Amino acid sequence: MTIGANTSAGIPRRLRLGMVGGGQGAFIGAVHRIAARIDDAYELVAGALSSDPERARISGAELGLAPERAYTSYEGMARAESRRPDGIDAVAIVTPNHMHFPIAKTFLEAGIHVICDKPLTSTLEDALALQQIAEGSGKLFVLTHNYTGYPMIRQARAMIAEGAIGKVRVVQAEYLQGWLATRVEDTGSKQAGWRTDPAKSGAGGCIGDIGTHAFNLAGFVTGLEVETLSADLSTFVEGRRVDDHIQILLRYAGGAKGTLVASQVAIGSENGLKLRIYGETGGLEWVQEEPNQLWYTPLGEAKRLLTRGGAGAGPAANRVTRVPFGHPEGYLEGFANIYVEAARAIRAFDAGTALDPDVAYPTIADGVAGMRFIDAAIRSAQADGRWTPLVGIGG
Amino acid sequence: MTIGANTSAGIPRRLRLGMVGGGQGAFIGAVHRIAARIDDAYELVAGALSSDPERARISGAELGLAPERAYTSYEGMARAESRRPDGIDAVAIVTPNHMHFPIAKTFLEAGIHVICDKPLTSTLEDALALQQIAEGSGKLFVLTHNYTGYPMIRQARAMIAEGAIGKVRVVQAEYLQGWLATRVEDTGSKQAGWRTDPAKSGAGGCIGDIGTHAFNLAGFVTGLEVETLSADLSTFVEGRRVDDHIQILLRYAGGAKGTLVASQVAIGSENGLKLRIYGETGGLEWVQEEPNQLWYTPLGEAKRLLTRGGAGAGPAANRVTRVPFGHPEGYLEGFANIYVEAARAIRAFDAGTALDPDVAYPTIADGVAGMRFIDAAIRSAQADGRWTPLVGIGG
Amino acid sequence: MTIGANTSAGIPRRLRLGMVGGGQGAFIGAVHRIAARIDDAYELVAGALSSDPERARISGAELGLAPERAYTSYEGMARAESRRPDGIDAVAIVTPNHMHFPIAKTFLEAGIHVICDKPLTSTLEDALALQQIAEGSGKLFVLTHNYTGYPMIRQARAMIAEGAIGKVRVVQAEYLQGWLATRVEDTGSKQAGWRTDPAKSGAGGCIGDIGTHAFNLAGFVTGLEVETLSADLSTFVEGRRVDDHIQILLRYAGGAKGTLVASQVAIGSENGLKLRIYGETGGLEWVQEEPNQLWYTPLGEAKRLLTRGGAGAGPAANRVTRVPFGHPEGYLEGFANIYVEAARAIRAFDAGTALDPDVAYPTIADGVAGMRFIDAAIRSAQADGRWTPLVGIGG
Amino acid sequence: MTIGANTSAGIPRRLRLGMVGGGQGAFIGAVHRIAARIDDAYELVAGALSSDPERARISGAELGLAPERAYTSYEGMARAESRRPDGIDAVAIVTPNHMHFPIAKTFLEAGIHVICDKPLTSTLEDALALQQIAEGSGKLFVLTHNYTGYPMIRQARAMIAEGAIGKVRVVQAEYLQGWLATRVEDTGSKQAGWRTDPAKSGAGGCIGDIGTHAFNLAGFVTGLEVETLSADLSTFVEGRRVDDHIQILLRYAGGAKGTLVASQVAIGSENGLKLRIYGETGGLEWVQEEPNQLWYTPLGEAKRLLTRGGAGAGPAANRVTRVPFGHPEGYLEGFANIYVEAARAIRAFDAGTALDPDVAYPTIADGVAGMRFIDAAIRSAQADGRWTPLVGIGG
């Protein structure tokens, strides 16, 4: 077992990382910073952490940035960093959704690799435009659908690719939370505030925030593409302006069927992302809250509990694992794996060398697919659940 | 705690029970007999166990029936038993679905109470006709949607009725099995054979066999009625003539949304009936394979594990429980609770006394609702998932 | 899979069963009656249900006994039944522990098979004397260590016998309850009352009530004998006259080591009987509260979840199973398996035919071993934990 | 909820950290480095990573150390670093056990704070001597009993301190692993090699490697001290020179009883550290492999599932948590909490300011207690389980 693979990721030199967003009180910014730090492959050296000059300065100081690299605008940061000989290699974008597009565009055009939080943008139009820009930029675009970084998700993906469960028939993806069961957005919660504001989150609420994670993960693991969907989107909390519960039927290319249910009003659920996949010769089940486990049932045999680092784990899982079985790795390690994979890709790219074919991370294409999913779901729901293909503007 | 309530059900005198179907090799017949026996409220005294005279005779002898009450036709049995002074009080019908109608009709018309396996019939027409017959017969009709007999299902139902989770928003019902993932019907399995034969099971396969259980249970627990549904029915096993995987979106009267997924091709699933219900002020979760547990989360509080007979169980659960907490009751005890409830109803009915208002069991109305569910789902699926109301012939 | 084996146990004729103890309000009497009834192998026809004539009469009527067979003394019952041509085949003894000896002696001497609740007696002297009587009587003696009846316990036993985990190294038996964490015996609880009264339960409290179950089960599954033990017995509830928490180190013949912990003050535990067994080439884990599951890990492989009736279950489990996988069997079915096995043994014995070698049930030898265990533990505890062999008077 | 508390630990300036041991292939060295990095409170600047000059150089380069600070001897490192104006603030000692003493002594005497892996030393004599040195040095000594860093362990500790379960009666600590069930030490495994070599690990094998963790954790959570113990130590794998399975009875000051079982031959166990604590008015249960959960049962109420960051978590847990409920934190985050707490203590100490009273970490006193535990257990086992007090040389 090649445990510890990722812990030696920190070699040659650390990549220089900048960050836009993620100042004081921002949850996901702190997560990205820890994720970047865990394997020592990055050094945070610059940031436009806040548009408020004073907060930007204080946040920068807290994070140990040199004062001149604690910018107050992302445009200024892109300009200045692109000119420095020791300028950032990559920027992490951790703002509300509606800002992803202009920021990513700016950095890509400044010749800087982008690591961007999900969903890709707040509209499908923006997503398609950004895809063009990214593809034309000659730079890498990494989307932090972080759940794809979990070792046992890699394991499941490899098993399906190798035929361990045969042709996939059924995909059940669900993502249940309960934290928005009341009007939390009225209590001053920054997290709840922008997520329920269509101007910042985009037209989708629950579907954009967590539904896209479930959609992406199901695709990552199965390798299947959704062709059409039939959606019912609901808003249960009175006065809320975006959906807070979604239930969607899926039809995959090749004949598989699926369901995707995501909720923010499922009281008692914390972060219940769950994937169940049934094929012609086996089944797989995985739950995010116990991420070190993967249940595998071969047809006609007893169910097996595969564990990260354990007897049933293979190379796809082991290459992104750090500590032995029974020592749980969690959300931050899974997130860190996206950063490690990104570092591998950036180094190979910048060095002009071949990328290890095992390296995997979500790209802008995944981001566009996610936006097509949101778009199709909203259109289907507006048409009372009509089966709607996942295409869109020019798609 | 009034543990042991059901164990004293055997008083006044045992009811005399007959059975149609359930001869050698029939799984559900044996289940009904054990269920009837557990609380000593019934005595099996007559049967039309098989249409083959020799098998009928042998099966009767094995079950200790008097030779003259081991009938070879249900018509003959109904006729003879209705004339005996010690004739049966009730008949249990445990044949394939398509025979429920004529048999139930015959016994009701002979003035004998009916305890019938589910689904009610093989067509909605039959169901509606039978409902009329039953209502005109002045006899009781008990449908063995046995999962409603589990004590913690009773607990959940009582909690929702008492407002423990507030107004229900979301219902997630699922019933996953994997035993029909291959062409088991070609291997000589009697169980698989009739279930996949539309002539015997009706137009629905998975939906009739297990989908109706999930549908019924969700309704029993929430007290809500499905108004419309959007269904996608699939047949994954090549050559199979009925559906083996269904996924359905539900809209309830009053605004709740739901999903119902049932599968017979979910390899690794055994008998995965599961119910999750989320309301405005709490959530409930129950899994058939751990039936003595009920998870309850009040809004803003820690999740609680309520157990049968335990501190969190109330009178609705305790009145159908036999042994103390930690001593698991299972499928047969849950099934037996239907028989005990039926016995209570039959005794009160026959004595002309008031029925204890806590007694609950599925009736022919539930059976008709289940047939409307099947009917609507098939029509919706044929119309590519159009939202379809749960009505039907004359409904 | 030969599911349903036990459901056809009711053939030739039902055995005639009597019961001593188990009148109104007695938990374990009702359990024995249901267990005897489930597979239709017995018919309850006589009882000395209470020493109070009025209660005996009413209890008998409630259970449908003929008035003349509702006895007021067990001596009278033994005498009368042994003379009737249709006298009982076997008697079930469900009184407090201290009465097991005189009652069993009386019925054995009257030529009636005995099915007796555990522990065998209240003293080791009584146990040894009873063993002599039983062995001289030419009658069967079945001790209802009911947990040995669970199918997955049979599975574990067969696997160990077949070498699935190699030579056993470690046995961890525990039995945690919390219901006696306070002075329940002062609240009028009949169950708590006699269990904490040394005159009725014997010198051991927790050790006799549940410790012996754990001891017996570990021996049944592993086939190993405890040679010596080192015990620490505690009484945590002030004023209680018997132990309510025990922790014991075990040394088995052949070199295995073990621990046995039983408690009645472990708040949050319901009926937590658990067995973990580790051998040279594998491990097994079983928990009474999820009795349909058995965890099996072969050396160097992933853990497997074996389920009753499932792919990993073998003939030893299947022959005592009734319903398919996923339909949980519980405490009462496990208990019923002891009664079915007893019926098989009694029939073979009375018919003078060979007994199916797969039939297994706890005997008086197990009862004596259990009393030696209690005796050795009490002596060890009195000697401050000295390693004490499991022998005793003449042993 | 003050989620994210630890993520802002990186302020004023990073502490300068050195490391002894932990070169290529060393598992625990990498763990310490990640733990130190997660919250950005440390910067690794020096190391004596290997006694082999070439390996020391390469390992240093890989970790980004300046060449002149990649030392080949710990003595040289202590000397040089203590003279540098930018010398290390603290050293992490991650060598096999027998080297802890001389290395810790050297750095303490050089005026450098010590963060040392457990167990403290390989003999009790060394431990006592080191305690004197540490106490005389005026420097801090942090022992990485990392499991004390888990938030829900902090929660359990706070709850017990606040009386949530009343006076503690029973402590059940267990730590089951299976990875040494065969002679892994003969396969070239570095991890297995030194752990089973008494010259490197000390007289205790399993007891020192994992038994001390369980011992320490039980003490940390309950606040109770073990007075005497009765131990049975076993070596199951033929030819192994240290124990690989231990079972110990404990008696605590104040009257609580306990068991401690640790094993390295429990096949199917990965890293099964588990704690169950029962008091007069409640019970708590925690399992390391699901570290974000804590089960709590108040007397007479339903069991509750407390989760990290969830409704039931209090300030003691929240101050060492980073991400919201449902986003699992794991082993590395728990380990990192020890490093964060150490950083808080070092900063306060070096600044001469008062230490936040909530800061908690294992100290050299805990290390000495652990060595007394090992020493007493070995002496008890040698005296055939005699109850043996936890004192020792001069104790």
Image: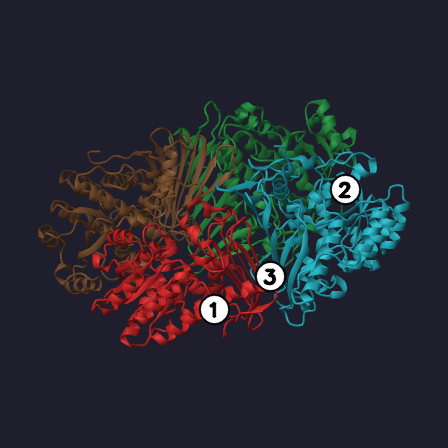
Chain colours: A brown, B green, C cyan, D red
Rendered-image quadrant of the N terminus of chain D: bottom left
Q: Residues within 10 Å of mark 3 (few under 14, many from 20)?
A: many
- The amino acid marked with disc number 1 is Ala
Give the residue at mark 2.
C42
Residue C323 in view, yes or no:
yes
Asked whether B31 or A56 is in front, the reply is A56
Give the residue at mark 1.
D369
Asked whether D320 or D385 is in front, the reply is D385
**Which residue is situated farthest in the right direction here?**
C83
Look at the picture and state if B108 lies above or below B278.
above
Report whether A115 appears left or right of D24.
left
Report whether B177 appears left or right of A217.
right
- The amino acid marked with disc number 3 is Gly
Q: Residues within 10 Å of mark 1 (few under 14, many from 20)?
A: many
- Kindly indicate whether the residue at mark 2 contacts the one at mark 1 (C-beta within 8 angstroms): no
Which secondary structure lies at badge 2? strand
Report in which chain the residue with disc 2 lies.
C
The label on residue D31 is none
Asked whether A365 or D256 is in front, the reply is D256
- The amino acid marked with disc number 2 is Tyr
Give the residue at mark 3.
C178
**Residues at discs 3 and 2 both on one chain:** yes
Q: Residue at x 33, y 33 (%)?
A: A224
